[in-house]
Image (tube, rainbow, N blue to C red):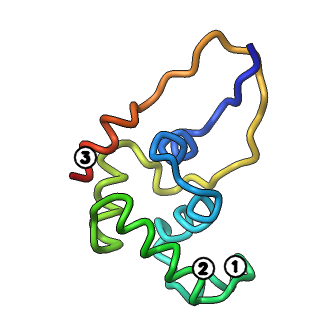
Amino acid sequence: MVRTMLTRNEQIMEDLKLSAGLRRILPLLMQGLSNAEIAQQLYVTEKNVKWHTGLLYKQTGLNSRARIMAGLAKIGWQMDAKVSEPKFVVVPQVGGLSVGAANGLFK
């Protein structure tokens, strides 16, 4: 079976079932960048970043960046890591945080 080797941060984003847009924005948000800075780096509008950030708040049940940062740090987000291009390898099983465990943190 061919599976993708994910970094810890990528695994967390996958376990939380984040959209592609949120997967691009979240690492920058976790670095403490403003909406304007994120928009500039991703070549999108600041309105687009605000919309996706609102979705993240709704999806996690948290209402601030500080709470999201604290919650993700609690489940193993690596603050200094950057999301990398996935590498494909053959592995029997990929472990990680269960969606239930992640969702339980945010309730």
Residue projecting furthest to the left:
107
Q: How crowded is mark 3: few (under 14 residues within 10 Å), some or many (20 or more)?
A: some
Front residue of this view, candidates 30 and 56: 56
| Residue in the picture at 29% in, 47% down | 74
Placement of 57 over or under 23, stated as above or below: below
Alpha carbons under labels 2 and 1: distance apart: 5 Å
**Residue 57: mark:** none
Q: Which kind of residue does numbered mark 2 sit on?
A: Ile
Q: Say which element carries label 3.
A: helix
Q: Is residue 35 above or below residue 9?
A: below
Residue 66 vertical position relative to residue 16 in the rendered view, above or below: below
Q: Where is residue 90 in the image (x, y as percent from the top left)?
A: 75, 15
- On screen, residue 81 above or below 58: above
Q: Residues within 10 Å of mark 2 (few under 14, many from 20)?
A: many
Q: Which numbered tag is attached to residue 41?
A: 1
How far from the left and from the top, in percent, is residue 7? 59, 39
**For mark 3, what is the residue?**
105
Most extreme residue toward the top, as rendered?
Answer: 92
Decide if residue 81 is on the left or right side of residue 76: right
| Residue at figure coordinates x 50%, y 22% from the top left | 95
Nearest to N terminus: mark 1 or mark 3: 1
Position of 3 with respect to 80 (left or right) is right
Which numbered mark, 1 or 3, is in the foreground of this view? 3
Q: Position of residue 60 (x, y in %)?
A: 34, 58
Quarter holding the N terminus?
top right
Is mark 2 in CB contact (under 8 Å) with mark 1? Answer: yes
The kind of residue tagged 1 is Gln
Quick check: 13 left or right of 3? left
- Which of the pair 15/41 is nearer the observer? 15
Cα separation, mark 3 vs mark 2, equals 26 Å
Q: Which residue bears the numbered disc 2?
A: 38
